[in-house]
Amino acid sequence: MTSYHSDPLDALRLGPGVKRPRRLRRTAALRDLVRETTLEPGDLIQPLFVVAGDDVRRPVTSMPGVDQRSVDRLVTEARELDALGVKAVLLFGIPGSKDPHGIESFADDGVVQQAIRTLKDALPELVVVTDVCLCEYTDHGHCGLLDDAGDVLNDETLDVLRRIAVSHGEAGADVVAPSGMIDGMVGAIRGALDDEGLQRVAILSYAVKYASAFYGPFREAAEGAPAFGDRRSHQMDPGNGREALREAALDVEEGADALMVKPALGYLDVVASVRERFPELPLAAYNVSGEYAMVKAAAANGWLDERAVVLEALTGIRRAGADLVVTYHAKDAAGWLQSGR
Ligand SMILES: [Zn+2]
C-alpha cells in the first residue's frame, strides 16, 4: 500500500493556496504583460562628439563604434537616429584650438554652435542638448578658469558658463546641460538665458556627478583629460550618497528643469534616492564611456552577449528611476528594440 508519506518528494511539495509567482513568468506574452519597466528608443539620448574641419569621421579607439564627426557628417547620423526613434542628442565639442580660458566655447562660429544650427535646420524636431563646460576647450583640460595655484575659480567660471549657455541657446539648442559641478551654475545660467530672452531653453543639470574612473575613455573621445591634477575638488566623492540629495536640492532651487546622475551603473542607489526625493522632475542617468567600453571589450572577446547585456543594463537604469538614459549604446539599442527582443 502506498501511503502519502512513502514518496520522499511529497514532503517538499507545496500545499494548496501557496503563492506561486512563477505563474506569471510562464510565457513570453505573460511576462510582457506584467513587465514593470519598459525601455523605448525615445527614452535614450545619444551623445555625439563634434570636431572642427570638413568630412571628418574619426573613430575613438577606446570606444568602438563611437566616432568624432565634423559638422557636415552629423546630419546623416542624426537622421539615422531619428528613424530609429531616438529623439535627442547630446553634443560635445572639440574645438580647433584650445587656450587657458576656453574662448572658443562661446564663439558664435564654434563647432557646437555650428552643429546646433545645422542639426536644427535639417531636423527641427530633434531635441538638441548641449554640454556646457570648459574642459574640452581649455588647454589645461580643467572645467573652469584656474587661479595661479591651478585651482578652479568658481565664480569667475560662472561668467564663462553664462556665455556658453547663451551662445548655445541663440544657436537653437533646446536644452543646455551644465556638467562642471561648479557651485551656482544652474542659477547663473538660468539668469543669463532669461536676460537674453531665451526663456524657452531648458536646463538639464548634471546635479550629481561623481569623480569617477569610468570616464576614462571619454577623455580620449572629447580630448579633455586634465593636463595635471584631477577633478576631485568639484566632482563628488564616490563614497557619498546623502550628499547627492543636497546637490540635487540646490539645483532644483536654482531652477533646473531636469536632473542627471552620472555615472549610472555604479550609482543606481543614487538614481533611486534622487528619483524618490524629487519625483516631480525628469531624471536622467548617464551610462558613461567606461561602462560602454567594458561591454564592448567583453563582447569583442565573445565573453558577453552584447545585445542582451546592453538591454538589461539600460532597463536596470530605468528601473532604478531614470526617465532618460544618456548612452553611447543608444543607436544600437534602438535598432534592437525596433527589431524586437
Ligand atoms: Zn568639464
Image (cartoon, rainbow, N blue to C red):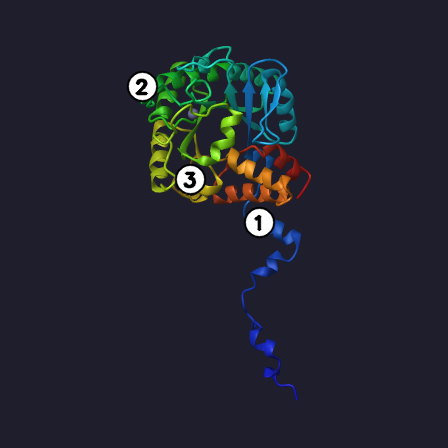
88 relative position to 283: left or right: right
Q: Is residue 198 visible?
A: no
Q: Secondary structure at mark 1?
A: loop
Residues 115 and 144: in front is: 144
Q: Earlier in the sequence, mark 2 or mark 3?
A: 2
| Mark 3 closeness class: few <14, some 14–19, many ≥20 residues within 10 Å | few
Identify residue for label 1: 35
**Quadrant in which the N terminus is drawn:** bottom right
Q: Earlier in the sequence, mark 1 or mark 3?
A: 1
Q: Real-space Cα distance between discs 2 and 1? A: 53 Å
| Mark 2 closeness class: few <14, some 14–19, many ≥20 residues within 10 Å | few
Identify residue for label 2: 147
Q: Real-space Cα distance between discs 2 and 3? A: 39 Å
Q: Quadrant of residue 100?
A: top left
Tags 1 and 3 in contact by the CB under 8 Å rule?
no
Question: Type of residue at label 1?
Answer: Arg
Does residue 47 lie above or below 279 as drawn? Answer: above
Q: Pinpoint residue 117: horizontal percent, then vertical percent.
A: 55, 15
323 relative position to 25: left or right: left
Q: Quadrant of residue 163?
A: top left
135 relative position to 17: left or right: left
Residues 164 and 305: in front is: 305
Tell me what residue is drawn at x 45 percent, y 35 percent: 213
Q: Quadrant of ligand 1?
A: top left
Question: Type of residue at label 3?
Answer: Pro
Q: Is residue 291 visible?
A: yes
Question: Type of residue at label 2?
Answer: Asp
Identify residue for label 3: 279
Q: Earlier in the sequence, mark 2 or mark 1?
A: 1
Tell me what residue is drawn at x 51 percent, y 20 percent: 93
Q: Real-space Cα distance between discs 1 and 3? A: 21 Å
